[in-house]
Amino acid sequence: MSQLDALESQSVYILREAYRSFKQLVMLWSIGKDSTVLLWLARKAFFGHVPIPLLHIDTHYKIPEMIAYRDRFAREWNLTMLVGRNAEALQAGQTFPSGRCNRLQCCAALKSEALKHTLSGEWPRWILNHRTGTYEVQPQPEAFTGVIVGARADEEGSRSKERYFSPRDKHSEWDIAEQPPELWNQFNTDFAPGTHVRIHPLLDWTELNIWEYIERENIPIIDLYFDQGQGTRYRSLGCAPCTGPVVSSARTVAEIIEELKSGKFANIAERSGRQQDAEDGGGLETLRRDGYM
Amino acid sequence: MTTATKTIPFNTYRAEKTALLEKMNIVIIGHVDHGKSTLVGRLLADTDSLPQGKLAEVKARCERNARPFEYAFLLDALKDEQAQGITIDSARCFFRSSRREYILIDAPGHVEFLKNMISGAARAEAAVLVIDAKEGIQENSRRHGYLLGMLGIRQAAVCVNKLDLVNYSRQTFEAIRDEFSAFLRQTGIEPRFFIPISARDGHNIAGRLDKTDWYKGPTVLEALDCFEKEPAAVDKPLRFPVQDIYKFTEQGDDRRIAAGRIETGSVTTGDDVVFLPSGKRARIASIEAFNAPRAESAGAGRSTGVTLDRQLYIQPGEVMCRAGQETAQVATHLRVNLFWLGREPMIFNKRYLLKLGTAKVPVWLRRIHTVLDASELTTEKNRSHIERHDVAECVLETLKPVAFDLSSAIAQTGRFVIIDQYRICGGGIILEGQRESQTLVAEHVAQRERNWRRSRITPALRAARLGQKSTLVVVTGPADQSGENLARHLEETLFNDGRQVYYLGINNSLLGIDSDLSRSGLRDEFLRRLGEVSHLFTDAGLILITTVSDLDPYELKLIKTLNSPGDCLVVRIGAQTDAEIDADLRLPADLPASEGAKDVAKYLAQQHYLPEYYL
């Protein structure tokens, strides 16, 4: 088996364990390359179907192409597509772009808070009506007990310490020192009432593996990752105000792979274009302890 | 930028262009402060594997905080770790040599975080064990070394670190090498290399300094490249633990697919297979996959799915084996070697969950043979419980038989974890399946009967007074209303005939004695209580009627045993879907409940439970 086969097999195994163990299961889809690969792996795991709802936390500052791409594939692949947001903070303008808070506080409000309350069902969720093509408020949202996330261990320090199945307490907090053990292919799929489990099928994948797999499987990836002629492209997608494109003329998946393997990005961290990381001495740890993806 | 996404034809699969490098997971273990993180940090720095600017960034942070720079800071990412200067949880680091890609798993050395070390090591294919030359072999050097064998890691290198602190003394290195070799030999592990290193100075990590010319072996980097990747176990008999059964009918897909990962062996269309523990047989109709070239077979390591040539009711947790090959064993009693990580000790008479392959079943600790202190290899007998960090040879009993292999034969289906209170609290390997001596439940009932206090009223006196012989009547069938309807009619029929009879509805017991149980989670505990309650009713001379949907043979045996010495009659409604149970009376599914009740009453009369019964 090739390395990609082995990674695929393990991720599929994890997805199936999650599907089997959690009745209230959801998969986060940020539209970026990692969670899109994750979505593709779900189609692999379930033989072309995606029996797990997808959740997108819309910060309202996402690059517009991302929304168009999301809705297109939600329709083509017949996805149960959910959207959540921090309507209150957006309305009050408590965001970094409006100048009322710093980047980290903005992330905490529009992502962590929105995610926490959308998962718990306290805040409304919008669900795509495939018949009309519009989003409607989901009636009686239930709390999700299993949340599948596309985090990779090579992204940054605190993610390198994750388990495949990582229990979170009632407040979505990650008690790092108290993580239960995880052995061989046996995961912590049981959970106490009121708590939930984060599931990370992509932990062992590197950025390069992701692109190699996209190439092998021919997965449709959003255009923002490719140079459209301006000599720049995005390497990591987030909110428009805090995510800068990198200088690169890679127009195809093959060119991106080349760039990562031996070219200009072989030794540069992927999240170097993300501004919020620089504000926290502990990298993303503070955000992640509080439920950030 | 354009708003439309690129149109690419979907569902096409491209062959991989280049042979990708292989990937290997290596765990770095050893006692706390012996320099594991420093070794990994040094390895990353010396092979240029750090992201640009990372080294400078960490050095600058150290300067700001007026702390001397250490290579370990490159690894210990958590704030608490940097503050305390120790590794709390295993970190994965990615790096690549000319031979392959590596994930280095930097495990914590503090005994408090043994669970984290084990989590890291259980993912690894080979280990590097680090020993401080000045401090010598310590408690966790030995404990970690011992656990390697249990975790299934066969390849190891031992690094004697901080040699700079002992002037690169050959004598010190050799003394540690000899002592530790002798220790590891007792656990069955033979390290391939002993390497004298100084992680701080960068000696024998990726390059050599002019310090140990007496050492002719490889550097750490070279040693890693010498490890061999274990080939996928295609040559062993097929083991395909069934993870789930999928049928996406609503999406217009009629395939019924048994999904799982092939742990060992291979499977091909047309193979005759047997599912264990149920023993059901079928033939492979197809191998299923999404967005991949059609294949007639699949081999070890693949997560895949199969369809069968016939409708079989199989459950997730069963192991699919190939007929004609050596199949998995089946037992309820397992002699195992187990390590315990729970805060609470593992004790007798407590219900735990066992996860083995894809099966998850209730399990009890039955016997403790010996408890080992893995840091000293000393054993203790006559222990009443297993403490945190103990390694115990013991016997476990499951409620229902499980399919397994001896870990020495097939590791993947020969190891398990134990769950206590929602968390994995222990793990182990199977040494032997034991012939069932006496089940926990039978032992409990024997003891219960020995100690039961009675008056001089005997069962015969009760039967004479009540004009009936007491028994439990269990109605089982599909999970619909038919069982309940029959049970209610039967109660009325017998009551109107003047019998002492009681119908215990499932919902009623959930309202009372079982109100602490969730509906789905603890079926076995619900059945245990039902068995005990039935025993009270039958002992009191009554006829008790109850219903349990889709009862399997083991569940029935549990109820019968707990109800004994009381009698038990089983009425089965409809065709059998699951494993055959021994029913005393079978009723067609379409029979009206009132008719069914008469049939059961007649049967009871024939079996002399109801003397003087006339229809």
Image (tube, coloured by chain):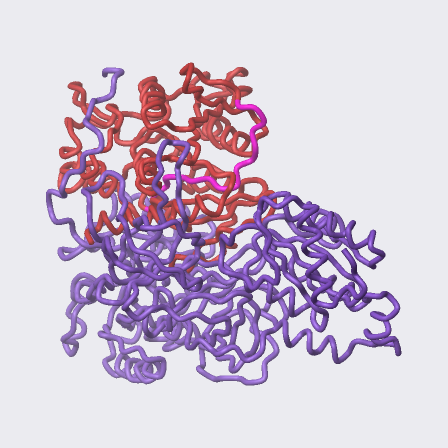
Decide which of A150, A267 is in the foreground and name it.
A150
- Residue at image position (35%, 64%) is B412
Decide which of A249, B358 is in the foreground and name it.
B358
Q: Which residues fall within the magenta stretch?
A: A138-153
State which quadrant residue B254 falls in.
top left
- Residue at image position (18%, 74%) is B212
Name the tint of chain A in the rendering: red
Decide which of B536, B589 is in the foreground and name it.
B589
State which quadrant residue B153 falls in.
bottom left
In this rendering, would B576 be left or right of B405? Answer: right
- In the image, is residue A175 part of the stretch drawn in magenta? no
Decide which of B437, A128 is in the foreground and name it.
B437
What count of labels does the image hold?
A: 0
Q: Is residue B593 above or below residue B43?
A: above
**Letter of the purple chain:** B
- Residue at image position (13%, 42%) is B15
Q: Is residue B396 above or below residue B8?
A: below
